[in-house]
Amino acid sequence: MEAVVISPAGRRDTWIVAALRCLYAVGMGAVLVTAAHLLAAIAEGRDFSGATITAGTVGTLVAGLAAFAELRYGGAAARAEEKRIRRRILIRYFAAPPEAGDGEGNSRIVTLMTDNAERVTEYRQAYYGATVAAMAIPFGTLAFVALAIDWVAGLAIMALCPLIPLLVIGFMRFFRSTSAASRRQRATLSAKYLDAIRNLVTIRLLGAGERVEANLREQGERNRFAIMKLLAGNQVVIIVLDSVFSLLLICASAVLAGLRYGTGAVSIGGAHAIVFLSVLLIEPLTQVAGFFYIGMGGKASERAIGTYLAGTQDLREVNRPARPARTDEVADGVTVTDVSYDYGRGPVLTDINLRVRPGERIAIVGRSGGGKTTLVNLLSGVLALQGGEIDIAGRRLADLELDEARQLTALVSQRTWLFTGTIADNLQIAGEAGEDEMWAALERAHVAEEIRRMPNGLHTDVGEQGALISGGQAQRISLARAFLSGRKIIVLDEPTSQVDIESEEKIIAAISAIGRDYTILMVTHRRSLLAIADETWELTGGRLERLEVAQ
């Protein structure tokens, strides 16, 4: 089953593009009929009428403006719909992301949001509407010929027109496997590039750079070959249809026009008009050039996105219970009520309830894979709620966009991410801060003295992913960054799990020294951290229970 990919606004834009293409055809039709009557007037030695000249001028303006508007509007509509599709994919991704380390799942998301989203919108907004209109234009043109010039010629040529969509459908079926192969090669190339970027450090440590480069080059060649094969098929279609079908239509129109003029059924001006209007009969062929690259690629991309959206049902809407009436609000505190979460493989959290008062320090323990990180991600706004409610600093997360929810807490992860640059660069990511403010935050994080001893102080380069400083220093810099964020609720996800004993002691001292104007939630398995917690809770089997810990 596939979900509907294109939004109502996107479907509206498709038909606006179709209408603009039809308007272009009307203008061109007026120009061609005017040219036919002018040629007839020259042949018969008559003067040109003012109405004829006016009709030709108006038709030229209409055709030019409609063609320009179709190009500009179709492009803008495609970009707008691309943003809407990416937003829907992101919402579903945050509602049910792949498991950690699922490189295939992540690379699929990258492909869907980049190549697939661009292809489907180019197809639907810029191409599909124009193609539908192009298919209708020959019938509209021949209806005009039948009603205004000669019904025999109009109906006779109209009988040939159904050959156009039949030929297109036939070629589409013939080249479908080629298009699918090209799409698979693009997806594989994206996945391999993503894996290489994600594991650059490991690749360097293993000395595997040349092997990975060769593998990527080989996959790039396979992708190039698949694209060239698709384009070659596209050119075959263009040659066949252009050389055979367009010639057939134009010759048939010329022969019929000549025969009808010979019998006196049409005037010389009408005969010329039938021949000239045959230009509009081959309008669909102008769309065939892009069909097997834009059309088939767009259809395949739409199926891929639709399948993903249908397979990752929006669990937030399915599982979210009716909201109970609020009875209180907690300023700078946290209230978790009946929270459940499911990645689609069974519940990870079940009916979690927790109350953290302002200024409290709460520790949460549990085995690996027990749901601690999921709870942290819900509290920090990394994941969207599916069931239950979370109130942070008096605000209900269900009422907020994800980016708003993330601004309520400061998260310090167990794997601290430092950007390439200086210590000051990394601190100022949390917000504009002067040197005095940065040093004050570093003092609170118990790392200021170590940084002062560095030759460049705040302007010391941390290297790629913080490689030039120790793990303990990186963790405390991350804690200082949390202070500079101005947020009063700090979530610590295993803050001492990847540091040595000395760094652990300094991190614990920094957390202990945090004033009661901050609310602290610590996910940890280190008993030394439990000693500074006001309460300790254990998350096991997806449920949260309070523990009594001897201090």
Image: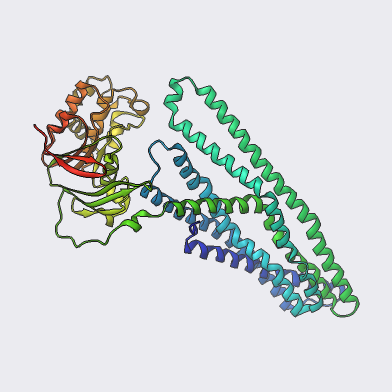
The correct choice, above or below, for 54 with respect to 1 in the image is: below
The correct choice, above or below, for 503 with respect to 25 in the image is: above
Name of the residue lying farthest toward the right: 262
- Could you tell me residue 237's position as x and y percent? 73, 51
- Could you tell me residue 363's position as x and y percent? 17, 38
User: Residue 516 appears in which quarter of the rendering?
Assistant: top left
In the picture provided, is 240 more to the left or to the right than 193?
right
Q: What residue is drawn where x is 40% and y is 35%?
A: 101
The correct choice, above or below, for 438 with respect to 31 in the image is: above
User: Residue 198 appears in which quarter of the rendering?
Assistant: top left
Name the foreground residue: 158 vs 460: 158
- Residue 136 visible in the current orientation: yes
Q: What residue is drawn where x is 24% and y is 61%?
A: 323
Quadrant that contains the C terminus: top left
Q: How many marks?
A: 0
Name the foreground residue: 264 vs 289: 289
What color scheme is it? rainbow
Q: What residue is drawn where x is 73% and y is 58%?
A: 167
The correct choice, above or below, for 97 with respect to 417 in the image is: below
Name of the residue lying farthest toward the left: 551
- Residue 290 visible in the current orientation: no
- Could you tell me residue 413's position as x and y percent? 28, 35
Name the foreground residue: 377 vs 358: 377
In the picture provided, is 481 more to the left or to the right than 93?
left
Name the foreground residue: 194 vs 369: 369
- Could you tell me residue 52's position as x and y percent? 73, 76
In the picture provided, is 109 more to the left or to the right than 170?
left
